[in-house]
Image (cartoon, grey):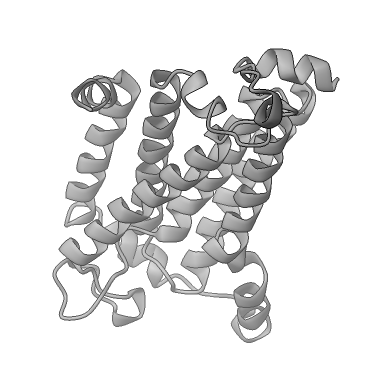
Amino acid sequence: MSEIAWGLASDKTAIFLAVALIIMTVLSAGPLHPIDNLINNAPRPYWDQLREPLILWPDTVASRFVALPVLGVTCLQLAYWHRSWRPVILGAVGPFGMMSLVAAMKLLFSRGHPRSGDPSFFAESGVSFPSGHGANAILIYGLVLFLIIRYRAARPHIVRRLAYCIVGIAILQSVVSVYLHFHWFTDLLTGMVAGGLALVLTIRLDRMIPEGRTAYWWPWYGRSLWRGDAPDPDPERVGAERG
């Protein structure tokens, strides 16, 4: 356990994102209030016509009710193809870590809702900071992309298009949330940084745990359950046989 903790804490990208998260939190607490207020008070054209459709459709793209089923289907399909619980484990650990981080920050900083007009922290009631939707867009959909790349489930040109889709989802979610007064601008930026940190730590954890630790847990690996044969923990070989 100590080796895993040290490995996660020593990841350079994770350290960079952790520092970025701290910096964004400090800036959101005061220095960036003018930007938050400027964007929050900007005119909203076609408000009456767009508000309800935006709430029902684009705003749900990065919600957990949409993103988690996408991740779940991806994890289960890859787990079945490669006879390993690893995709399922990663699909559970990543979102749980991200939700824990975001929830702790929401409760700690208690930022008021944009409709209150006050972006200060430690309001009487508020859980605006950071944005869970922003974190979902990066962590959940980013984890889907990572699993597809890791198990070579799509061709490179498809992977690139999926990466563009994730960027588009993050931008769309930010624009819609700001337009609807659901989040301050810095809520969304900080949420994406938090999601990126959780994603990097999940990928790092995957690289630290040997493949066989999870492949041997699979109970229905061909005829190994009845013959006592050891399953092959190599996902590349399994993928080649499938192909």
Q: Is residue 66 above or below residue 155?
A: below
Give the position of the C terminus as an image quadrant: top right
- The percent position of residue 135, horizontal first and vertical second, equals 43, 51
Q: Quadrant of residue 60?
A: bottom right
Seen as rendered, the residue at the extreme bottom is 48
Nearest the viewer among 232 and 108 is 232
Q: Is residue 166 above or below residue 133?
A: above
Residue 38 at least partly seen? yes
Give the position of the N terminus as an image quadrant: top left
Q: Quadrant of residue 206?
A: top left
For this view, does 115 lie left or right of residue 20? right
Residue at (42% x, 43% y) in the render = 93
Q: Quadrant of residue 199?
A: top left
Nearest the viewer among 9 and 210 is 210
- The percent position of residue 187, horizontal first and vertical second, equals 35, 58
- The percent position of residue 191, horizontal first and vertical second, equals 38, 51
Nearest the viewer among 221 and 234 is 221
Residue 33 at least partly seen? no
Q: Is residue 116 above or below residue 190?
A: below
- The percent position of residue 182, horizontal first and vertical second, equals 43, 72
Residue at (61% x, 18% y) in the render = 230
For this view, does 157 lie left or right of residue 108? right
